[in-house]
Amino acid sequence: MTEWSILWDAREVFSNGLIATVQLFVLSTLCAFVLGCALVYQLEHGNRLSRALRLLINLMRTLPFLILAYLLYYGLPPLGLRLSAWSAGLLALIVYHAAYFAEILRGSRLVMPEGYVEAAKAHGFTPLRLYLRIILPTLVIKTRPLLGNQLIIALKDTAFLTIITVQELTAAANSVQSTYFIPTQAFVVVIVLYWLISICLELALKRAARFGAKRGFDYV
Amino acid sequence: MSEHTHASDVPAVSIKKMSKSFGDIEVLRDIDLVVNKGEVVSVLGSSGSGKSTMLRCINWLEEPDRGTIHIAGQRIGVNEHAGRKMTGKELATVRAKTGMVFQGFNLWPHLSVIQNVMEAPIYVKGMPKEQARAIAIELLEKVGLADKHNAFPFTLSGGQKQRVAIARALAMSPEVILFDEPTSALDPERVGEVLTVMKNLSAEGYTMIVVTHEMEFARAVSDQVVFLEKGLIIEKAPPAQFFTNPKTERVRKFLEISA
Ligand SMILES: Nc1ncnc2c1ncn2[C@@H]1O[C@H](COP(=O)(O)OP(=O)(O)O)[C@@H](O)[C@H]1O
Ligand SMILES: [Mg+2]
């Protein structure tokens, strides 16, 4: 039996891993993005809560992702909160990348021309509507390359979760290589799979780029 | 019915004893101004005299330190029932009665021309999309941009942008439209197209407060001309009187220089 046919026989392991990775990625980045947007809305208020959140966001960004994942998986049970590896990993991805999304949007908010906001206020937009309809779309279009970058980073961060025993794509490769001792081929397969997901992302980002260009938005 | 007749007597804008400082500098002092429905008030004065600040206090983009402002009879900025400042939401409902046109246009860049005009009616007034679209089509026709519905703001000339901004303000059927130097950022050959639209609006009976350096416009269109000097209204008169027989030496000088 050749090494490649071993891989073919293990296809179910890979496909399960792939599905898990895609699920983790899509779910976590969606939630992280929404959370990041909510954080930036709260920052608009400039009150005590905003300042506390600012601090938390900065703290999160100085933390290596793996430490956060460890903390949520191994550090919470002694405090009485036991999460499954999957939940802990998902939560870690969400919280961590929400901080980055928030920081990207906040940075762009600082340099957004105040005139757009004033025009909306003058036309009677409530603060929430103003944020959702005017500020947020402008920020997202403006920062689309940075947001896209963050998505790629989030995809790669899902691989860390193998260390807290989440059965995702990298875990699948690891299990195949340790069972059949074919590390090179096993990892080449997952590299290709990660690469395919990235290509899908790139295509989506190209569309986003065109959407922005059509509206006269420069790159950041 | 009687309430209605009453309502039409209420001024569109009524400012009483309004003052505003930035730090130690008093930018506006004891401003009193009543603008009746259908009136056009031009605000003149040299740069830094407080014209923009006055306009921005009317819709609470700047918060005055003292005085009261009523828009169509409703106090802006302060909830008198509750005896406190208005919340963001309360403020929004009063602001929805005013329109504003800025020197820098401030069209929302992510929205097409027609979307810019439909946005506030839909998301502020809760108007059905189709109705908002019908209104927007009519207004874009009125400002001469019927062929630009799907263009994005960055593709337009300054004069076109400003006409979209005017349509955007009109779409909310405001009690008053505030214009802050609407033609000052335009190429000279584009000024006329915007002034023409504004003249038409005044003929249709819109209430407008216009900060401008366009003397011809102020003379031809205004019901009142107000002159601001260092935060004080030093003259307030109908244009015939203001331009031919000013009371103060300061205005006389100003008119000489502008002529
Ligand atoms: N946000 C602000 N902070 C501090 N000073 C301001 C601010 N806005 C305006 N000013 C000052 O207030 C004065 C009046 O400004 P403004 O109302 O813009 O005058 P105008 O529109 O007549 O040129 C100027 O001296 C200006 O520097
Ligand atoms: Mg000004």
Image (cartoon, rainbow, N blue to C red):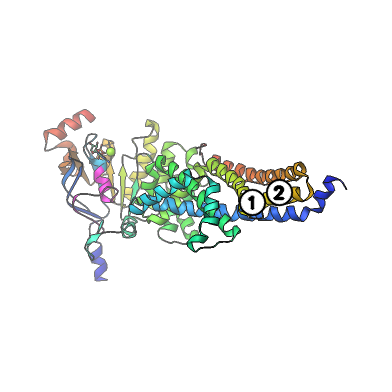
Is residue B207 at least partly visible in the picture? yes
Front in this rendered view, residue B228 or B238: B228
| Residue B71 is covered by the magenta coloring | yes
Residue drawn at x 26%, y 36% is B215
- Which amino acid, mark 2? Asn
Chain name for mark 2: A
Residue B29: percent from left, percent from top? 15, 44
- Using the image, determine if residue B69 lies above or below residue B182: below
Is A60 left or right of A210, judged from the image as shown?
A: left
Q: Is mark 2 within 8 Å of ligand 1?
A: no
Q: Splitting the image into four quadrants, where does ligand 2 fall?
A: top left
Write down the quadrant of residue B225 in the picture: top left
Residue A63: percent from left, percent from top? 49, 45
Mark 1 lies on residue: A162
Residue drawn at x 40%, y 41% is A110
Tell which residue pokes out farthest to the bottom in this image.
B1
Chain name for mark 1: A
What is the span of residues highlighted in magenta in the rendered image? Answer: B53-75
Is residue B145 at least partly visible in the picture? no
Q: Disc 1 to disc 2, how far (Cα)?
A: 9 Å
- Label number found at residue A174: 2
State whether discs 1 and 2 lie on one chain. Answer: yes
Secondary structure at numbered mark 2: helix
Residue drawn at x 25%, y 49% is B63
Residue A56: percent from left, percent from top? 42, 49
- Mark 1 or 2, nearer chain start: 1
Residue B60: percent from left, percent from top? 28, 51
